[in-house]
């Protein structure tokens, strides 16, 4: 049974989401302020964290930033509808995805299942470490190394890197990457994929020959340069 931590100060919404997700087979743990939520996220293991932005004591961004300093548990942020700034900031800090409130119950369940399915698919026992140039990926442990130095990647960033390396030299369209990495169709004005790619690029060390690792084809997608 997959374990989910819901950090939201709306008690009514928390109760409804708890009932919904328990019917879907998830094990729910609740926290109603940022400080308590962070403590539970750091001291227990969860398959996913649902994190609201507006929280007492610590807001969602503060919780996520502190969490990412120690753990890479997948995080789905719950943001105010129409507040693009919140979504961009959340993705920059390390959220795996976001969902604007109010949201459709089915869409929430679909997003949760997509993130967990992707994470579990990358960590199957049959997934063996593999060397890609100066990068070494261990899918079973969700870890990536460059010159034996661990890269602090989120689950989404690891999945994005893994897929790009497996298709090195080929154009990966944004539609392909959105479906394979984020588990959703690419929608107009959705910057999630671009933000994840930007974060990944910042965390990858420069190549010894100075060549870029990823080439962007504007309006089309990305190519990993072998």
Image (spheres, rainbow, N blue to C red):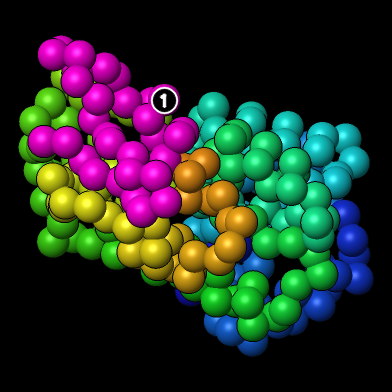
Q: Residue lying furthest bottom in this view?
A: 23
Residue 120: x percent and y percent?
34, 63
Count residues near mark 1 (Cα–Cα under 10 Å), then give few for <14, some for 14-19, many for 20+: few
Residue 166: x percent and y percent?
15, 51
Residue 114: x percent and y percent?
46, 69
Residue 43: x percent and y percent?
59, 41
Quarter-of-image position of residue 108: bottom right
- Which residue occupies 87% across, 55% down? 9
Q: Is residue 9 left or right of residue 71?
A: right
Quarter-of-image position of residue 40: top right
Between 85 and 35, the one lying in front of the other is: 85
Quarter-of-image position of residue 92: top right
* Number of numbered callouts drawn: 1
- Which residue occupies 42% across, 40% down? 197
Between 8 and 91, the one lying in front of the other is: 91
Q: Which residues are magenta?
A: 197-226
């Amino acid at each position: 049974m997959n374990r989910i931590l819901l950090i939201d100060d709306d008690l009514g919404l928390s109760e409804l989401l708890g009932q919904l997700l328990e019917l879907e087979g998830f094990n729910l743990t609740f926290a109603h302020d940022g400080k308590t939520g962070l403590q539970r996220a750091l001291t227990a293991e969860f398959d996913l964290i649902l994190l609201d932005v507006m929280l007492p004591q610590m807001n969602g961004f503060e919780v996520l930033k502190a969490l990412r300093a120690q753990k890479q548990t997948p995080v789905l942020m719950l943001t105010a509808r129409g507040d693009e700034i919140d979504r961009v900031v959340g993705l920059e800090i390390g959220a795996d995805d976001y969902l604007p409130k109010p949201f459709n119950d089915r869409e929430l369940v679909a997003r949760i299942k997509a993130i967990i399915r992707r994470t579990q698919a990358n960590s199957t026992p049959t997934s063996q470490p593999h060397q890609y140039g100066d990068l070494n990926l261990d899918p079973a442990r969700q870890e990536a190394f460059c010159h034996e130095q661990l890269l602090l990647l989120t689950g989404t960033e690891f999945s994005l890197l893994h897929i790009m390396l497996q298709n090195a030299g080929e154009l990966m369209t944004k539609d392909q990457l959105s479906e394979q990495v984020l588990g959703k169709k690419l929608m107009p004005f959705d910057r999630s994929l671009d933000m994840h790619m930007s974060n990944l690029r910042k965390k990858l060390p420069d190549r010894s020959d100075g060549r870029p690792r990823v080439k962007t084809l504007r309006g089309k997608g990305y190519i990993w340069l072998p």
